[in-house]
Every structure is written in structure tokens, then in C-alpha cells.
Amino acid sequence: MLRLLMMQRGFVFLALIALLAGCKASDDVVQTSEASGPEATSAALATAIFASAEPPYDPQAVTAELETAVSLWNSHNITAYSIEVRHARPTWNTQIIKLVVEDGIVSDFEHTCYPERDCVLRDVDPQSMTVENMYDVARQIIPLVDLNPEVTFNHTYGYPTAIGNNDAGWVFDTFEIIAPTP
């Protein structure tokens, strides 16, 4: 999923370069600078890159988001929930783990993978996929700036919605509270 997003961004960037390289000013267009040809294209490209640049990754800010999410999760005092986790690594089929968690312990789980016809089930500890344990995974991934970490959280309950980097990724779907909070 992270790689798809990076590929889409790369495609947009290449399309922008192709568009700028193919553009030529017509005679009836007034240019506001003396630059022409490659210089104008270079200036336009630099402006486009600057305008579309994402802010630099800030591990301290992401760590603060993590701690806010943990506090939000704890404030709800959720004792039983179900969640589906899609776990991927570069050499694995996507592993799909559906968990039922009660008092922090996995009480039931189903493990499949995608694509089902050709997939290989990997040895995955379902207990490692609980919300509480995935916060620890996020803490380990956040400082790994060179591996392009990505960590996002649900704004209502605080559970992770995605944790990943170039080496592994976890996406969390179909969260449901099973037992009401006391």
C-alpha cells in the first residue's frame, strides 16, 4: 500500500516533468522574465516541486501523535474488540488476521492471506497484532527515518489505522467494539 502511494506520487511527478518539457510559449504570450527555453522549464519545475513538496518527516511530532492516540485509546477503556489486520512484507503474500481481543488477550482469530489461490500462510503471532502491541511496533518504526515510516491513527478511538515502512506494513480494518466499556 505504501509502495502504491509512492508509485502514484512518482507518476504525478513524471507527468509534471513531461508536461513542462513539452510546453512552449507562443508568440502572443507575454513572458514576465528574461528566462527562456531550458531556464524557464527549470524555473517552472523548481516552482512546481517546491509547491508540491511535503513537509519534512518529524519523528518527534509523530511520537506525540502516537502518545495522543494511546491516551485516547486508554480513555475509552475498551475491554473487548475485533479488528482485521492486513500485514505485508516485500517477500510475503498479504497476511490477513482477524482478531477477537478480550482484556488484551486474543481469544479468537482467523488467519488467511491474499491472493487466496496462491498464498502462503506465514508464521504470525496473533497476540502481536493487538492494538496495544501494535503501539510498540509504531514506537520502533517511527525513528527509522531512512525507511520512510508512516503511522496513522483512528481519530475516534486512537487505534492504529496504518503502520509501515519500506520493510513491512500493517493496515487495520473493520474495528468493532464487542463489549461496552464499563
Image (cartoon, grey):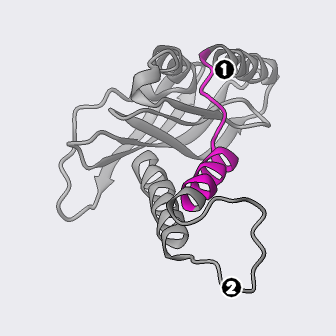
Is residue 127 visible in this depiction of the protein? no
Q: Which mark is residue 27?
A: 2
Left or right placement of residue 106 versus residue 78 in this view: left
Return the residue nearer the eye: 87 or 24. Answer: 24
Q: Residues within 10 Å of mark 1 (few under 14, many from 20)?
A: many
43 in relation to 141, above or below: below
Gap between marks 2 and 1, in whole Å? 55 Å
Q: Residue at x 62, y 28 (%)?
A: 56
Number of other residues with Cα within 10 Å of mark 2, as a class: few under 14, some 14 to 19, many 20 or more: few
Q: Nearer the viewer, residue 36 or 1?
A: 36
Residue 65 position, x and y percent, is: 71, 22
Magenta-highlighted residues: 41-59
Residue ID for mark 1: 66
Going 73% across and 59% down the picture, which residue do you hit?
Answer: 33
In the rendered image, the residue lying farthest to the front is 34
The residue lying at 72 percent from left, 23 percent from top is 69
Q: Position of residue 134 (x, y in %)?
A: 51, 23
User: In the image, is residue 29 above or below residue 125?
Assistant: below
- x and y percentages locating residue 12 in the rendered image: 52, 62
